Every structure is written in structure tokens, then in C-alpha cells.
Image (cartoon, rainbow, N blue to C red):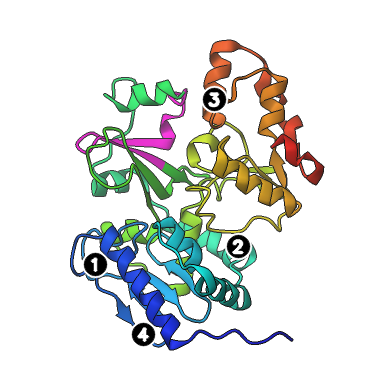
Amino acid sequence: MGTEVVISSEMKARIIDKVVRVLHHAHSHPEKRRLLEGRERLNFACPYCGDSTDSPRKKRGNLYWDNLFIHCYNCSAHVSLDTFLKDHNLNFEGEDRIGVLNYIKENQKSFSLGESLEFHLFEKAKNLSLTFDEIALGFNVYPINSLTYRAYPYLKSRLLHHKTEKFGYDPRRKELYVFNLTPEGKIIGFQTRDLDGNNGGPKYKTWNIERIYDRLKKPLNLSEEEIDSLNKISMIFGILTADLSRDFTVFEGPIDSFFMTNTIGLTGVKKQILDFDEIPTVRYFFDNDIEGKSKMIQKLKSGNTVFMWDKFLKDFRIPSKKVKDLNDLVKYEFKNRTGCLNQLDKYFTNNHLDLIFI
């Protein structure tokens, strides 16, 4: 057995100082900048999602002392302290960072697929799903058709205008709604995209089931653990429609996932809410950029199946700069008719010798 790694009171104080700096940079409201210290955890307004839009007193971000992981019960962000600080342009240096990393490694808790995605929770998510009309009343959202200003031209520019049932539009805020649907077409979560860039804050905002129910002032009479698991499910696009018993493909975001069948869409490569790695039928198709490729290299080294961007683009003589993701590839193919989309399946690999082709 190795030497037990402990965290000193001095180190705790330095961690608290770092978290406070993150909160001051992320939030403008004094209450949201306030940190609550407990024996087992720190409690604060989550800097990833901004936490509650109704009450600045709500603090659903948590840093747990027993494993130095941050978890938000609003947006379901789940990252180590090291990643949390990097995401907010801070970090520990030297021995402090080594100590933090060692502590995380020794005390890491698994948030595996099996823990969170049990069958009864799938059924519960379906039972909690909402109709478009319910969302429309609470969020000022309208269906999209060919006459919808801004939203329909945007979808058409991305060749998604034939999938309008997956979207909604708020004309006042000029926000596109991307829905996470059940097989029956009801809504368990959604992501909004600011089409104008004038609303302030991030371009994309993700709403899990708890946050939606909170906005609609509907009670969720469930345990905190059940709500946490359902929040995760509601932020994984396609999770209730994909068949995980056969090959399914995981994308960084929901938009790309709409161009293939049997797919999962995440809300960013940095925020993989659940770990699909233990499912033998999983394939990863992340973006053709540094972050996406780095993540796929990690996945391939772990024995998972990933898409070989470099080999694919070279074989079809497609300029890499023109194609960042599957949506870009579909648009490129629409103009150039190379026939490449019919060959995608041939460019997945789980052979670690193919690292040079990622």
C-alpha cells in the first residue's frame, strides 16, 4: 500500500483563495461571489453555468474535500480541481500542484455510466419530459418554419432546415433552442444559442431538467441523487433515442449528432458528463481541432474507437482548414460531391498504431 495522501489546512486555505478568485472573475453579484465553507465541501454559485437566474442566493456548485472534485447540481459540470482552475485560467504551481494531483488520484471517485444510467432513470426521464407547448409557455419559444426570421436561414445555412422539429426560436432574445428529445418527441433538456451575440454571457447555454423545472416553477419530488442523475441524462443529447447495444457515435455537440443515425451529442469535449468508455459499441467523432483530436488520442490510447480525421481528409483531398466538424463536412460535400460521407464508417479505428492518422 502507498503512503496516504492528505490535504493540510494550509493547502485548503490556498484552494479556497483560488476558488474565490474564480468566483470574483465569473460573477458580478456580491452574493454569487460569496463562498460557503463546510466541513465536507465548499458551496458556491457555479461559474460554468452562472447558477440560478432567479435567485443569487442559490449555490449549486460544490468542491468536495474528500476527492477535490467540483460538481454542479444545476448544469452537472463534473471536473477535478485541477481542470476547474485551468478552465478559469488559474492553477497551482510546483509542489502544490503535485500535491493536488496526487490527492485527486488517490481519492478519485468513479461516476460511471452504470451508476448513473439505470433503466428506471430512463423511464423517469421520459415521465418528466415536457411538451413543446409547455416549454413555449415558460420560455417564449416558437416552432420554426420557412418564414421564421433569423432562425430558419441559420438552420438552412447549416443544412438543418429539414430537421426543424429538433429546434425552437425565441424571437425576442434571438436565441435558437436545440432540444434533447425522447422517442415520443418530448423535451428533457435543451441548449440555447445566441444568434446575435447581444445577450451577454456565453454563446451557448445548457438547460438540464432541474433548471427547466425550476424556471417553470414545477416541483421535482426526487432525492438529490436522482435529480443529479436525471440532470446528467437530460444533458446528453440523444441518450433516450440511441441504441447502445449496437455501434453508436459520440459527438462534441448536439448539432453534429443530427447528421448521423444512432448518435449521442455532448455539450463540449471538456464536459463529458458520463463515461461511455466501458461500452464496447461506442465510437468517438470529436472535432477536427486541437482539443478534439487530443481527446480522441486519449480515447484511442485507452482502447476506444475513434475517427481518423487526418487520413480521411487526405484520402478525399479535402483541405483541413475548411472542415472543423461533421456539419462542416456535410456542407463541404453538398458543394463538392466527393462521395465521402458514404465512407465515414471505414475511417474509425481502435488500433493504437493509427495514432498518426487522427
Element class at badge 2: helix
How far is the residue under mark 2 from the one under mark 3? 42 Å
Q: Marks 4 and 2: CB-CB under 8 Å?
A: no
User: Is residue 296 toward the left or the right of residue 331 in the image?
Assistant: right
Q: CA distance from mark 3 to mark 4?
A: 49 Å
Q: Name the amino acid type tagged 3.
A: Lys
As measured in the structure, the alpha-carbon distance from the residue carrying label 1 to the one carrying label 3 is 41 Å
Q: Label 4 to label 1, Cα distance in Å?
A: 17 Å
Q: Residue at x 52, y 26 (%)?
A: 328
Please tell me in which quadrant of the rendered image residue 285 appears. top right
Q: Which mark is residue 210?
A: none
- Front of the two marks 3 and 4: 3
Mark number, residue 38: 4
Q: Which mark is residue 32?
A: 1
Q: Quadrant of residue 318?
A: top right
* Above or below for 143 versus 115: above
Q: CA distance from mark 2 to mark 1?
A: 36 Å
Circle 4 crowding by C-alpha within 10 Å: few under 14, some 14–19, many from 20: few
Callout 1 amino acid: Lys
Q: Front-most of 134 and 289?
A: 289
Residue furthest top as drawn: 336
Location of mark 2 (residue): 119
Q: Which structural element holds mark 3?
A: helix
- The region drawn magenta spans 159-178
- Left or right: 279 in relation to 286: right
Q: Amino acid at mark 2?
A: Phe
Is 125 above or below relative to 223? above
Task: Please name whichever residue, 79 or 225, is drawn nearer the observer in this view of the structure.
Answer: 79
Assess whether residue 51 is covered by the magenta stretch.
no
Q: Which class describes the residues within 10 Å of circle 2: few (<14), some (14-19), or many (20+)?
A: few
